[in-house]
Amino acid sequence: MKFINGVACRTRRESLLHIIAQAEAGTISAKDKNDARFGNCAYVYPSGNNCAVGSLFSKEQLKDIERLEMNEMSIDYVADKIGQKNIEAVTGMKLSELESLQKTHDEALQNSGFEKARQAVIHHAKDLLRTR
């Protein structure tokens, strides 16, 4: 991990491996139905878990997202407010890749539940690792 202007930045590969590790550890997606935000992603769930994209941000960055009332907004909306270049620099990933991970998580969560959402994120992140 490198630092740009004091901010920790991952490479694309580091981000994808981090997402996989977090999903395998069960810290991506809601823990249970009381924790869920159906219909919306949450960068930070009440339990402290994150969505796939949220797991890439520091606690300070997540606090900023919450303070700006963007915790349940799509990553393209957040990027519009915070800056696409900033998000891409922090994650090492293109906005379109982050959007696809968020969409995969949200659709699986909505249709199949928490564990299926984690598995879908792992599968999608591994697919992204195989490209580029």
Image (tube, grey):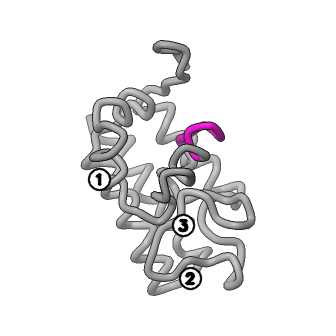
Residue named by callout 2: 113
Cα separation between marks 1 and 3: 23 Å
Of callouts 1 and 2, the N-terminal one: 1
Residue type marked 3: Gln
In magenta, the rendered stretch is 56-62
In what element is the residue under mark 2? Answer: loop
Residue type marked 1: Asp
Side (left or right) of 95 relative to 19: left
Q: Nearer the viewer, mark 1 or mark 2?
A: 1
Q: Nearer the viewer, mark 2 or mark 3?
A: 2
Residue named by callout 3: 119
Residue at coordinates 50% horizontally, 77% vertically from top-left? 109
Observer-nearest of 75 and 110: 75
The residue most toward the right is 47
Q: Which mark is residue 76?
A: 1
Observer-nearest of 52 and 131: 52
Q: In x, y percent, where is residue 72?
A: 47, 65
